[in-house]
Amino acid sequence: MDKLRSDTIVLRGERTELIMKTIGFISLGLIGGSIAKAIRKAHPDYRIMAYNRNREVLAKAISENIIDITCEDRDERFLSCDYIFLCAPVEINLKALSWIKEALPEGSRCIVTDVGSVKGPIHEKAEELGLGSHFIGGHPMAGSEKSGFEYSNDRLLENAYYILTPGSNTGLDQIGDFTELVSSLGAIPMVLTPEEHDFITAGVSHLPHIIASTLVNLIQMLDNNAEYMKTIAAGGFRDITRIASSSPEMWQQICLENTDNISNVLDDYIRLLIQVRCSIDNKEGEALYQMFQNSRDYRDSIDVVDNGLIRKSYVLYLDIADEAGGIATIATILAMDNISIKNIGIIHNREFEEGVLKLELYDEDSFQRSVALLKKRNYNIYER
C-alpha cells in the first residue's frame, strides 16, 4: 500500500501549482489526527506526510485521504516539510528534535512545532540544540478524555484557543505565517512565552486535574463498605470531578514536566484551604461568606452557568461546523418544538471538553427533548 501511495504522490508532486505547503506529522493521535484532518479540510492542496508507530493508523489515514505519504521513523522526507508537528509523547518528541537538528539542511525554513501541555522542557531542548529559529511551541486547548486517531475530527480546533510559544530567535514573519495557518483551521491563536504558558496552565488546567483526582480518592477513602457516598455522588460532585477520568499516564507526565509551577500553585491552594479550615473552626461567618461570594462572582464572569448543590444545570454540548447559520439552525430546530434556550455559548478553551457549542436548558424535559431532536438530526451530542 505504501509504495502504491508514494507513486501516486510523485504524480501529484509534478502538479506543483496544486501543492502550496508540505506538512509532516510525527504521531497521529487525537490531536495530531485532528490537526491533520483540519489542514486537509482547509487546505486540500497541501501535501501531508506522517509517521506513526501503529501502521494501522497510517493505513486508515491514507484510506480516508487525510495524509498523502506514510513515513518511517527518522524519514528524510520530513526534511522537505514547511511544518513538522510533533504529536508524540514528550520523550519521543525530544528525540525527534535531536534528529531534525542533525539532518536539517542549511538554510531550511522548516518550522518545528509540538502540541504538548507543558512548554518548558521542549523549549529548553530546542535552545540547547540551536533550533531557536526553527521552533514554535504549540498547545491547542482542545481535546477530550478519549485518545487515539479514531476519535480525531476536523472540527476539534474550531473556536478553541491555540497557544503559540515561539523560540528565542524565531522571526516575526515565521510567527505570522504559523499564526495564519492556525487561524485558517478555525482556532484562535494566542502568543505567550513558554514561562507564561506553563504558569497559566498550571493554575487553570493542571491544578484542577490534581484537585479532581485527590477529591475522588478522598471520597473513596472516606466511604464505608455500603458505598453510600459513591451511591449519592452526583450533580456537583460528578461535574467537578469529571476530568479525573483522563489518562493517568498523560497527567503523570505533565506533573513531572511542570513540577515547579504546579508545586507553587499547590502551595497557594493549600494555604487557601488552611485559611478556610481556620474560618470554619472559628465560625468566622463573614470570611466564609466573602469566600463564597468572591468565587461566585469570578466564576460567573467566566461563564454564566447555574451552580450549586441543589439546583441542577441542564447543559449539553455538541459538535457544530463553524459556518454561517450553524447556531441559528440549532435554535430554530429547538424553537419549532417550543423549547427555550436559557444560555448558549461557544467553548474556546476546550481542553478535555467534547463539543464546541454549549446549550443550557431550563428543565429536565427541555433537556431530554433537545437531546432527542438534535440526535435525530445527526448532531453529535455530549451530555454532562
Image: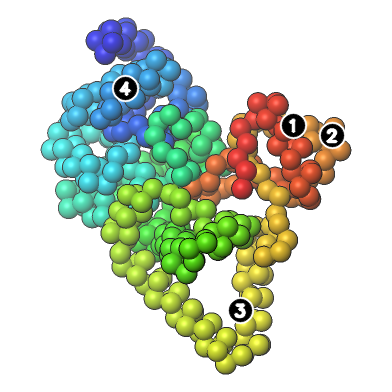
Identified at 18% across, 30% down, the residue is: 74
Residue at 49% x, 79% y is 272
Q: How far apart are the two marked residues, 3 and 4, measured between alpha carbons?
A: 52 Å
The circle on residue 45 is none
User: On the image, numbered disc 2 is attached to which residue?
Assistant: 337
Residue at image x 31%, y 29%? 24
In percent of width and height, residue 366 lies at 79, 43
- What residue does disc 1 label? 373
- Indicate left or right for 47 with 299 as reference: left
Residue on which the image places disc 3: 291
| Mark 1 or mark 3, whichever is nearer to me | 1
Question: Are there few (<14), some (14-19), or many (20+) residues within 10 Å of tag 1?
Answer: some
Cβ atoms at labels 2 and 1 below 8 Å apart: yes
Q: For mark 1, give the secondary structure.
A: helix
Instruction: Give me the C-alpha separation between circle 2 and circle 4.
Output: 44 Å
Q: Earlier in the sequence, mark 1 or mark 3?
A: 3
**First along the sequence among labels 3 and 2:** 3
> Can residue 162 be spotted in the picture?
no
Q: Which class describes the residues within 10 Å of circle 3: few (<14), some (14-19), or many (20+)?
A: few
Q: Which mark is residue 56?
A: 4
Above or below for 307 versus 162: below
